Amino acid sequence: MGGQVERWQYLNPGKTLAETLDISHTTLLYVEGVTVSFDGFRALNDLSFYVDVGELRCVIGPNGAGKTTMMDVITGKTRPDAGYVFFGQSINLLELDEPRIAQAGIGRKFQKPTVFEQHQVYENLELAMAGDKRVWPTLMARLTGAQRDRIDEVLGIIGLRDQARRPAGALSHGQKQWLEIGMLLMQDPLLLLVDEPVAGMTHQEMDRTAELLLSLEGKHSVVVVEHDMDFVRSIAKRVTVLHQGSVLAEGSMDEVQHDPRVVEVYLGE
Amino acid sequence: MGIVKALKGDTGGQVMLAVLLVVTLVVPVLNLAVPETSFWHVSTYTVTLLGKYLTYALLAVAVDLVWGYLGILSLGHGAFFALGGYAMGMYLMRQIGDRGVYGDPVLPDFMVFLNWKELPWFWNGFDMFWFAALMAIVVPGVLAYIFGYLAFRSRVTGVYLSIITQALTYALMLAFFRNEMGFGGNNGLTDFKELLGFDLQSDGTRAGLFIASAAALALGYLACRMIVTSRLGRVAVAIRDAESRTRFIGYRVERVKVAIFAFSAMLAGVAGALYVPQVGIINPGEFSPLNSIELVIWVAVGGRATLYGAVVGALMVNYGKSTFTAMFPEAWLFALGALFVLVTLLLPRGIAGWLPARRAG
């Protein structure tokens, strides 16, 4: 166990994880022929799904289509019965456990935002920052100039610069969601998996979230699972429609919307 | 530099340390230099009582570190205090030498009484002060480390953890009550004569122990402040408030918990080691679960997660206890229970939360 990442880090200490990746084929994530069964129910059925470097992808589908299960498989929470999941050409995610997958550069935001309410926004980002998280280095840790700049940059991206010194518990629901995305960014992930980012948001907050996710495109690959079709329409370039555990259609929002199979199972409702 | 940073924004702590400094400078002078007939004279009894309170305050700070900042409600911290006390007690026993009732140059009286012929192996080395002082810190630390490692790795939290800490101190109490354990059984260790060659009954030694207790409290307080103001302290609060989220952003929660828990136990051990020469006895009653619960009440009264609140709470409750038990010896536990209920209902953040200019974390 441990696999490629650990071996690579052992041989090449002090280099970033991005260098462990082989993304020469411009594909960051490979999910191939993945099947997951729960008590005979096939949550994922021979699912194949690819994400390019720097791409922003939306995944839609009716309830029970397998969206969350797919995220669970990628982040190591659920083991598939069959199939392959690779990060780049070389890292086999099925060999890694949850923390290692996170260290390899895959960050996940769950539906319900959880921030450290007693801590300031700034401190939330500081704690999430990539780095040595063992006990003694954490006790001795001092922020370097570069780290301060990075926190400031992320504060700018998530639009919470004015709130930096407020306790996170005092933020609105939408701001907490952004802070959590910011905490993900502090971990320098190559791939962000974002589950229902606009649930419970006002329209203005939704617009702001759309801007935020669009601004990440190119620097990070982002996979957004969302129910809200207006929101998906506002950000999506490529959309994947899941149905009964496999991909039903994939393409631009227009193509997908006019695909008769999609209309039948989902949009036509 | 580090000290200044640790106390930045901690008004309560600054005031507490300033008062402590003044008291530490003034009380020994009033005790030793002012004649007994003077109004300003402070009796040796009072000096020793204050010294005892200061060791309790250090113990309360140790509890607040794990309860206030890490969310671990330890109901067994009295055990670490007592172990530190026993380590010091063993040194003091060895110092008695042949001045015991039975006059044995090596064996403490209780061993002669039990008809033992030689010193048990674990009593070796306790004739040296440095060794005993080291053990007063190491033994509680190692016990807390092993206990914490097992409990936190199994992800035991909340009330279940509190119950097993309570079981820990209860089990130790039963063990130390047994004569075969070699720690004096029911009677414990007492009849001490000297510490580092200084007569324990002399006023000068009593004042010295008082000053040492004050210094230990100040240093322990500063060490805890340095921890809670570091990033590790922020991780601890994050664990307290959202443990699984902290794990998810990459911290080994168990290791943080066990490290801080063990450090807290070491502070409790130091407090116990300073307590014993001042009260002149250590017996298994110190392991009583009731003691551990009582000290949690000190922290609750003073105010959780402030550190200085723990000091204030320990001093006030113990002063109250000394006064109250003199008047109504039977009613103290009722008064303590009522105090806990009232503080929980009316002052959920304790005295410190009620004072102005308080800043959490």
Image (tube, grey):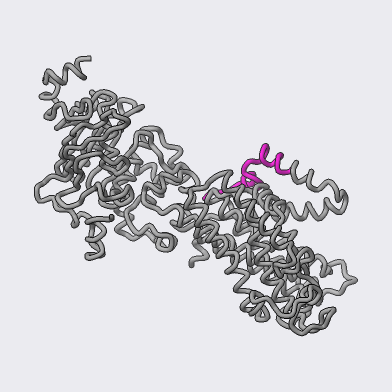
Q: Which quarter of the image is occupied by the N terminus of chain A?
A: bottom left
Look at the image and give the residue range highlighted in magenta.
Answer: B339-361
Residue A112, quarter of the rendered image: top left
Q: Which residue sits furthest top?
A: A269
Query: Is residue B32 at all visible to an observer of this figure?
Result: no
As for residue A215 lying within the magenta part, the answer is no
Q: Tag count in the figure? A: 0
Q: Position of residue B134 (x, y in %)?
A: 60, 73
Seen from the viewer's position, the closer of residues B250 and A125 is B250
Relative to A4, say whether A262 is above or below: above
Relative to A15, say whether A129 is above or below: above
Q: Residue at x 76, y 77 (%)?
A: B108
Q: Is residue B154 left or right of residue B85?
A: left
Q: Residue at x 9, y 48 (%)?
A: A25
Relative to A269, say whether B157 is above or below: below
Q: Is residue B302 left or right of residue B2?
A: right
